[in-house]
Image: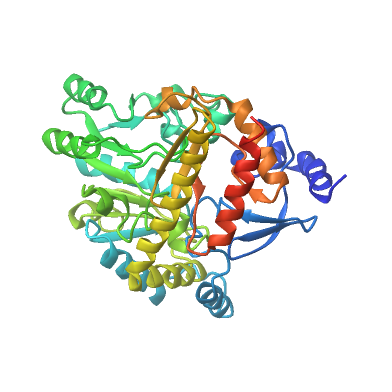
Amino acid sequence: MTKSEALFKEAVTYIPGGVNSPVRAFGSIGSTPRFIKKADMVLIWDEDDQEYIDFIGSWGPMILGHNHPAVFDAVVDYAKRGLSYGAATKIEVEMAKLVCSMVPSIEMVRMVNSGTEAVMSAIRTARGYTRRDKIIKFTGCYHGHSDGLLVKAGSGVMTAGVPDSLGVPAGCTQDTLSAEYNNLDSVRMHFQRCPEEIAAVIVEPVAANMGTVLPEDGFLQGLRELCTKYGALLIFDEVITGFRLQADGAQGYFGVTPDLTTYGKIIGAGMPVGAYGGRREIMEVVSPCGGVYQAGTLSGNPVAMAAGIAQLSILKSHPDYYVKLNQKADRFFESIKEMLKERGLPYQVNHIASLGSIFFTDQKVRDYDSAKTSDTKAYADYCNYMIQHGIYLAPAQFEAMFISMAHLPDQLCHTLDLMQAYFERK
């Protein structure tokens, strides 16, 4: 029995399912979670000292790689001053100014502690600002585990085969309307049915919780136009895409301006942190300025702020990093496409900038329904092979691979060689 297997056996006694987040469970690939003990750049090591090239990167925020020296030094420096004050600090002002300077649509920003909290708070803000109750979300898009958003969510919910969640009262979701990603008509229908009741449309500008699914031409712009026409707010959930596609995120990449934006751990370089922000007139409805209450003792934690400022400052100062990163990632994912084509394998590779997914289906993946056609057993076989050979992938079909600036060409070539060896067996 390996150390990871022994730890998992112990963990299931004390932790539901043996993990503290369902996406860490290896049940969908019929395996046991690897218990990670350390990381550096793009390498991680488990408790059995097995080394892996990491393509999860803490689910996206490690865009500079693990343990980047500037981030590490900033964390150590601030940790020496104390871990939490529950009081205002200079560094949270610096973080707010930095985010506002990098994302033109954000004039004010509120720090929170997770992407889930950021989305929950942004929706409350949208409802408070518009004095409306209903929201529109998209089937297969995941916006955290708050009650009102666990409706046809993606990611871990898809993997578990549970469309919603027990414990969510019907009243919590009665104002949540579901539309189809990449289908403007499904959104338009909701607006026509209740034109003065919809507070906001929330969307992952690039869906990354049903695998990587790109917005089709005109989809995001169409959402912007519909929201403007009907007086609703457009919320971009950039927990995955923010500061990853480019410095100003998906909104800059696609040239579409949301009213509110939510972020997660990438603004803390992987520390537990989140944020939501937007136009001043909207954000000023948030307490203590306005009547929308939201609070958090740990919000703006100085250690997390220090880590985030270190990472974001590097990204802001080096726009060329994104060019190099995206070119590197494009070559990687296009190589996978070519590899599959040469072997006559009909699988789909969706990618944009430095994130992408292989779907084990012969259908073009453009929404939740087409993503669900993937052969999850085939993915499980592939994923187990790669992990056993030192490539750490998400243990679920419906997640993304993340390329970081720390991935070296020889590491990517080694990964491609292993993929080729696997697919040659087919």
Q: Where is residue 14, by image quadrant?
A: top right
Give whichever of 423, 391 is nearer the camera. 423
Which of these two is toward me, 48 or 226? 48
**In the rendering, at what x and y percent does residue 254 appear?**
25, 48
Picture quarter containing residue 237? Answer: top left
Q: Residue furthest front?
A: 342
Residue placed most toward the observer, 422 or 158: 422
Judging from the image, the colouring scheme is rainbow
Give the residue drawn at x 61%, y 36%: 423
Q: Using the image, determine if residue 306 lies above or below residue 420.
A: below
In the displayed structure image, the side of residue 231 where residue 236 appears, left or right: right
**Is residue 376 at least partly visible in the picture?**
yes
Q: Position of residue 32 (x, y in %)?
A: 74, 40
Count of labels in the image: 0
Q: Nearer the viewer, residue 110 or 71?
A: 71
Drawn side of residue 233 relative to residue 15, left or right: left
Q: Name the image quarter holding the N terminus.
A: top right
- Residue depicted at x 24% and y 41%: 234
Position of 199 compared to 154: left or right?
Answer: left
Residue at 33% across, 67% down:
319
User: Most extreme residue toward the right, as rendered?
Assistant: 1
- Picture coordinates of residue 331, whole percent (x, y): 44, 52
Quarter of the image containing the C terminus?
top right
**75 versus 276 height, above or below:** below
Rendered location of residue 276, percent (x, y): 34, 53
* For residue 51, side relative to residue 416 (left or right): right
